[in-house]
Amino acid sequence: MKKFVDDPKQFVPQMLEGLALANPDTLRYVPEYNLIHRADGPSDERVSIVQGSGSGHEPAHVMTVGPGMLTAACPGDVFAAPPVEYVIETVKLMRSAKGVLLIVNNYTGDRMAFEMAEELAAAEGIEVRTVFVDDDVAVKDSLYTVGRRGVAGNFFVMKAVGAAAESGASLDELVRIAEKVNSVTRTMGLALTACTPPAKGSPLFELGDDEVELGVGIHGEPGRERVKLGSATEMVGWLLEPVAGDLPVASGDRVALMINGLGGTPVSELYLAYGIAHKGLTGKGVTVDRSYVGEYCTSLDMAGISLTIVRLDEEIDTLLSAPAEIAIRVF
Amino acid sequence: MKKFVDDPKQFVPQMLEGLALANPDTLRYVPEYNLIHRADGPSDERVSIVQGSGSGHEPAHVMTVGPGMLTAACPGDVFAAPPVEYVIETVKLMRSAKGVLLIVNNYTGDRMAFEMAEELAAAEGIEVRTVFVDDDVAVKDSLYTVGRRGVAGNFFVMKAVGAAAESGASLDELVRIAEKVNSVTRTMGLALTACTPPAKGSPLFELGDDEVELGVGIHGEPGRERVKLGSATEMVGWLLEPVAGDLPVASGDRVALMINGLGGTPVSELYLAYGIAHKGLTGKGVTVDRSYVGEYCTSLDMAGISLTIVRLDEEIDTLLSAPAEIAIRVF
């Protein structure tokens, strides 16, 4: 394993400590719960927004905390759901008179932790609602999921509800917005290489020198099929067609297009892939109004990309245009 | 080779096309010269700032074009200096009554192209000055260099002169600022893996499973020595000590600290390394006032990092604090 790691058990705490040291004016770190929250904390003037999930997907979600995005993130260890205790203590610390919104990518472990935390918080008189993100069109069920998985498209849900919360929207309104954005967002990914979790020390799965995993999950779960490596144009097409077809998009639609790097793919290749996808959509008569190229939701050091399309209307476009301030610029 | 590539000869043009398509409001692309320039073009109210270098170091430099940073970048092919023609045509197109500043990382090929372009531009009556960046402390001379190499520290030179140019500073003033920032900036890098240029199709050098190249260049040039893989704390120390010692920094100094990813290392590891370096400097009585964690100057898909320290004074701190707008947020 070639990584910057001391003790693998300390990988997440050391990363969070570095994040806090690099952002002393904007972030606070509570080591007991792997909790990163915005420095100005919760406010009774706005709903608090919390996202958990396992670590290893950075910048999601600890690096997307800040005004206009998440109020806090409380990740688990690498690829492991946060313990219920982390979530419930985070909810208590981020308590707001306007309520707390939990955003959860649809994985069984994460759902269990957040649903239990929601119950416990309700018992303490905290108003909490939970929304699930399930944008991945690759597979119906998966290793760790019943139903579709939540992947990089969760960025758009976070961004939209973050903007609405900042302008004082109610908890009910945020739930409506989150579910609406999720309903018009679709993603599919492709791995060129496996990723190596620090505690395992070796690649999570085997992939031949000429093979790619089409529809891979962000924890290395199998996708639709293992196929031979293609050209950039071919591989982008393998993602674009199922995503555009599932949404669906039609001539005249306006969309946001994201090429998300899975961790080991350089930004030069991401822009190259973006250009191919952009022209593919334009060729269908679709207008790309918003562009997102970079790392949003990774899988450690996995080489590969995911492609996300969001069908825009005026409300979503306005929410995505709102300012936000986070450690990593992803928009 | 597992990459998003169609024809390797089209790698750079396709990347630049994708960059332009993703940033239609802020960037313009002139395919004849691999030229990316800010959409509002040059202005007689401010010096134009141009940087070239080979491609493969993205976001440097095509993705750091915008208000407060570069006016334009005209890269060569992957790891190849831009042809003189690209530079001279870029200088002509970016011509300003206040002059044109060329920033060049110190590699022999890049120096030749830019020095020749400077002469040709002068012959056409364009006022041009060139500054060289040589922040890499790893080696004195190198495969492609006489003297020190210019690496990720060039970001600080670009940022400082970009801010000064935006406020109307003269060409002489920009040269003074660039040379001053370069004189207080030091960097060293470490490779965990080699990188694979698209046209070569295989890794640029061989590195054993338990080896790292300490002091590696951003084109895969050999560094100080090949050593056994260490822990994160050890490896960060191997960079921090030579950089801090060369500058030097002393107790009471205020600095900017950058952990730059070389392309294949995930941001989780970058923040982990940042925390170790930050605490190392604090332990020496040095105050870290500015933090930079992410990819600034890469080497395609190479796994590894470089560490940069800039000794701050009030002028440099103010220039680095100024706003800027580029495709990739790196500050």
Image (cartoon, coloured by chain):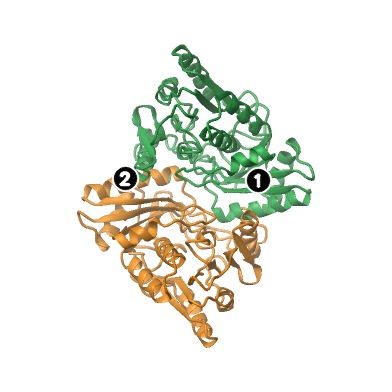
Chain colours: A orange, B green
Q: Nearer the viewer, residue B37 or B307?
A: B37
Q: Residue at x 56, y 42 (%)?
A: B322
Q: Nearer the viewer, residue B298 or B257?
A: B257
Whether residue A74 can be seen here: yes
> Where is residue A318 shown, x and y percent of the image?
35, 59
Q: Nearer the viewer, residue B14 or A215?
A: B14
How packed mark 1 is, by other alpha carbons closer than 10 Å (few <14, some 14-19, many 20 or more), is: many
From the viewer's perspective, is residue B214 above or below residue B182? below
Question: What secondary structure is found at the residue carrying circle 2?
Answer: helix
Is B19 on the left or on the right of B59, as rendered?
left
> Where is residue B228 shown, x and y percent of the image?
68, 46
Q: Residue furthest bottom?
A: A123
From the viewer's perspective, is residue B9 above or below residue A297? above
- Disc 1 marks a residue whose amino acid type is Leu
Numbered circles on residues, count: 2
Residue marked by disc 2: A276
> Where is residue B16 shown, x and y percent of the image?
38, 37
Between disc 1 and disc 2, the foreground one is 1
Q: Residue at x 30, y 50 (%)?
A: A288
Distance (Cα) linking label 1 and label 2:
36 Å
Residue marked by disc 1: B257
- Disc 2 marks a residue whose amino acid type is Ile
